[in-house]
Image: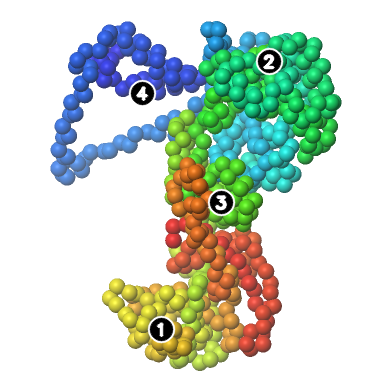
Amino acid sequence: MNAILEQRYHINVGNLCGQVRKRHPWADAKIVKEVIDEKLFGILGEKTEADDKKPLKKKKEKPAKLEDQKNVVVASAPPSEEEVNPYSIFPQPEENFKVHTEIFFSDGSIWRAHNTKEILERHLKATGGKVFTRFPPEPNGYLHIGHAKAMFIDFGLAKERDGNCYLRFDDTNPEAEKQEYIDHIMEIVEWMGWKPFKVTYTSDYFQDLYNLAVELIRKGLAYVDHQTPEEIKEYREKQMNSPWRDRPIAESLKLFDDMKRGLIDEGKATLRMKQDMQSENKNMYDLIAYRIKFTPHPHAGDKWCIYPSYDYAHCIVDSLENITHSLCTLEFEIRRPSYYWLLAALGLYQPYVWEYSRLNISNTVMSKRKLNRLVTEKWVDGWDDPRLLTLAGLRRRGVSSTAINSFIRGIGITRSDNSLIRIDRLEYHIREELNKTACRTMVVLNPLKVVITNLESGSIIDLDAKMWPDAPSDDASSYYKVPFTNVVYIERTDFRLKDSKDYYGLAPGKSVLLRYAFPIKCTDVVYGDNSDTVVEIRAEYDPLKKTKPKGVLHWVAQPSPGVDPLKVEVRLFEKLFLSENPAELEDWLSDLNPQSKEVIPDALAVPALASAVLGDKFQFERLDLFVRLRVSILTITSKAGLGGNFILEFLLRLLCR
């Protein structure tokens, strides 16, 4: 109060709102701000001329001299409760009798969402007072990194409170759903480190949903409508009631039964909830509860030809499964009134609904519709293309679930705006993880042959190479063997004909150090058809390592005379889109990066990579991080008549090369 009286309208209202939020996490932020403004006006009265002026900034004090700072202990601010535990913002199940949503009707009445004491007691008895959440994906595509945030919140809250989280497939649209997507989702949830309490389907409750729809009609709160989609849209825009809105209850009951028995053609009738067509919220405009679709269901079979809508089924199944916290992204906030209207109309338990900001990342698209188009029109190589931020694509790219969850925790789960998060932030967490888990090795992408003239042909010197930068010298498991012979290969870009002071590669008459091996000096150059094409370099090596060149190169040698090094296919990936936010572009497909994928079919690797298995991750020294994608064994006859070379495919790990 002293601060308010002293600072008047210059008081930090945001700080006051934050304090209220800690004590009343259910409170609507907009209402809190309005109440605080009203209270301030009651204390301070009308604003004065001084209140409208900007407060004078205090002059910065000169920094203390160095000797004065020696004894000063700088205390960093302790992390907030939300930073330590991001789930602390959520209330306990037993608190779910409080009002946190208001429904405003066009007749001036207001209904406040809450559970009665009796309903809440029944709910707590059924759950034992535990937290119950649900992760409810639609099985109409692969999951992307936005779903990772939803999993982190849904499964994470349940885990933190020693509760349970359902994996519930929201399968109300049989035309778009496939078993492939169901199988993928179950696999990827497990890969992300989450264990569902139970796997359920909205279709498991089709009979319950139908029975409740009949009850809704009997209460006069639903009706069968014959308007076309175009007519429904027109009537909604004009906020006009449907001509069939007030048809007799018995008539709607009979027609709804006809719909169920397949006696009405598809598109000729729907069941609509009788809500409030004159409401200020368009999601109260008599939403559709059921529509006719003569399509077999991937989970329920051909038992049904009417299917519930999301707006009808979602809240009811939340209630039937005794969900304590129904958590979703902010675009669903406008649906809260409809969610609670239906549960109140049926006298069902009402879960606590809370929305969080959706995850938007730069240089990609997150819409399932857009992702589906990229896949079906073959702009990318499937749902697990490493250029997509699908979880399958990230996994194939070598990203761990630990890195993804670390990224999600870092951005937080609050109701902030839908700001665009730069992909660099995700890559930071990926690098942090892979620097600890991806062992080092050597691969040459664009090979240039170097013949060591002072090393006898047939000589093989086995050298130790580090798998980790700080590998201890007494730990043999942290090293791998690389052969050094008289034929080695370096990167073509590591050689030039004209030297310069700022160049550390190889040039005629110049020496470089081959990593883990010896210094070599270029003594001759073999040209191709013209003086611009170099096909081979002759060099001498320094076996005593007396030379101390500045440049250090990675390399690969022939494992034995006349035998080519291990051949690998390397795929280099860059950002899929050129713009930071392609989703906002009208012609977003024209923003695709034509250089987002480069395939190098004939890179060379050290022999140790032949034993790599699916999922192994590597950092190619002086290049980048890669993951083993797959191995194909092909028989390739070399010039010497030897066969059996491995062809390995590797995948570029990170984008910032």
User: Distance from label 3 to label 2 (Cα)?
Assistant: 47 Å
User: Distance from label 3 to label 1 (Cα)?
Assistant: 39 Å
In terms of secondary structure, where does tag 1 sit? Answer: loop
Residue 169 disc label: none
- Between circles 4 and 1, the one closer to the viewer is 1
When asked about the image quadrant of residue 233, the answer is top right
Residue 243 disc label: 2
Residue type at numbered disc 1 = Asp
Q: Residue at x 20, y 43 (%)?
A: 70
**Residues tagged 2 and 1 counted as in contact (Cβ below 8 A):** no
Q: Is residue 248 above or below residue 294?
A: above
Instruction: Report which residue position mark 1 lands on.
Output: 532
User: Distance from label 2 to label 1 (Cα)?
Assistant: 82 Å
Q: Is residue 634 above or below residue 152?
A: below
User: Distance from label 4 to label 1 (Cα)?
Assistant: 67 Å
Residue type at numbered disc 2 = Pro
Residue type at numbered disc 3 = Leu
Q: Residue at x 75, y 26 (%)?
A: 268
Q: Relative to 418, is 481 on the left or the right?
A: right
Q: Residue at x 49, y 33 (%)?
A: 357
In terms of secondary structure, where does tag 4 sit? Answer: helix
Instruction: Report which residue position mark 4 lands on.
Output: 14
How many numbered tags mark residues here? 4
Q: Residues within 10 Å of mark 3 (few under 14, many from 20)?
A: many
In terms of secondary structure, where does tag 3 sit? Answer: loop
Q: Relative to 37, is 216 on the left or the right?
A: right
Pick the residue in front: 419 or 195: 419
